[in-house]
Every structure is written in structure tokens, then in C-alpha cells.
Image (tube, rainbow, N blue to C red):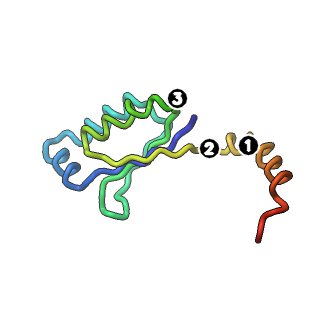
């Protein structure tokens, strides 16, 4: 299942890694292991280093092996959200149509 993971870590942890020269190589190593479809990095609304990473998760038992490197290296906070690309959304049309047929009359709007 395609997942969107948000990873953010405290300024202090990021600064310590930057000062020691390990920030880039540690992030690269974690991403090399994960092999994401895409990864983007920003400063979040709290001024922390933050990444949005899209990857394939075969089963939920993978969560610890995906999360622990970020926890251990950066004291990070993570969220996992299932995500769809345009083809996934197109494939979902029959399910959407069925929901409209079954539940659409009760909607208020």
C-alpha cells in the first residue's frame, strides 16, 4: 500500500547532526534502505526539519523497521497516512459510486 510518511525532528537533534556532519548521510542511509517513490524536505510550521516521504508498505509489521531509524537518529515524530496516486483514485471509482448509491441520499449539503 502506498503510504505518505511525515517525519519531523526537533531543531536540537537536527542541529546536532548537522554540526557533527552526519545529517545528510544519515538521512540518505535511511532513504536508501526504504527506497521511497518520492521524498521532499521542508521546514514545517514549527521551524523543524521535516520530510514527506512516499513509499510502498507491504504490511503494517514493517512500521517499526521504517520508524525506528528516524526515532533513533533524530528523536523524530512520524505519521503514516495511506495515499493514492491518480491511477489509484481512478480504480476507486466503483467503490465511490457504490457509496453514493447506498449512502448518498442521506447527505446534508
Which of the 4 image quadrants contains residue 70? top left
Residue 59 numbered mark, or none: 3
Which sits earlier in the primary sequence, circle 3 or circle 1?
3
Q: CA distance from mark 2 to mark 1?
A: 10 Å
The N terminus lies in quadrant: top right
Q: Secondary structure at mark 2?
A: loop
The residue located at (26%, 54%) in the rendering is 10
The residue located at (62%, 44%) in the rendering is 84
Left/right placement of residue 56 relative to residue 85 reads left
* 57 vs 86: above or below: above
Spot occupied by residue 28 in the image (x, y as percentages of width and height): 32, 35
* Whether label 3 touches label 1, CB < 8 Å: no
* Whether label 3 touches label 2, CB < 8 Å: no
Which sits earlier in the primary sequence, circle 2 or circle 1?
2
Q: Secondary structure at mark 3?
A: loop
The residue mark sitting in front, 3 or 2, is 3
Which of the 4 image quadrants contains residue 85? top right
Which of the 4 image quadrants contains residue 82? top right
Q: CA distance from mark 3 to mark 1?
A: 20 Å
Spot occupied by residue 16 in the image (x, y as percentages of width and height): 16, 48
Number of numbered labels in the structure image: 3
Residue 84 numbered mark, or none: 2
Residue 92 numbered mark, or none: 1
Which sits earlier in the primary sequence, circle 3 or circle 2?
3
The C terminus lies in quadrant: bottom right
Spot occupied by residue 80 in the image (x, y as percentages of width and height): 47, 44
- Residue nearest the viewer, comparing 109 with 39: 109
* Whether label 2 touches label 1, CB < 8 Å: yes
Amino acid at each position: 500500500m502506498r503510504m505518505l510518511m511525515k517525519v519531523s525532528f526537533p531543531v536540537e537533534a537536527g542541529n546536532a547532526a548537522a554540526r557533527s556532519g552526519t545529517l545528510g548521510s544519515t538521512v540518505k542511509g535511511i532513504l536508501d534502505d526504504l527506497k521511497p517513490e518520492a521524498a521532499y524536505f521542508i521546514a514545517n510550521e514549527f521551524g523543524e526539519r521535516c520530510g514527506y516521504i512516499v513509499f510502498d508498505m507491504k504490511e503494517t509489521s514493517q512500521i517499526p523497521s521504517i520508524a525506528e531509524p528516524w526515532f533513533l537518529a533524530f528523536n523524530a515524530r512520524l505519521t503514516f497516512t495511506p495515499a493514492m496516486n491518480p491511477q489509484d483514485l481512478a480504480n476507486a471509482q466503483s467503490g465511490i459510486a457504490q457509496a453514493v448509491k447506498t449512502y448518498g441520499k442521506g447527505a446534508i449539503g
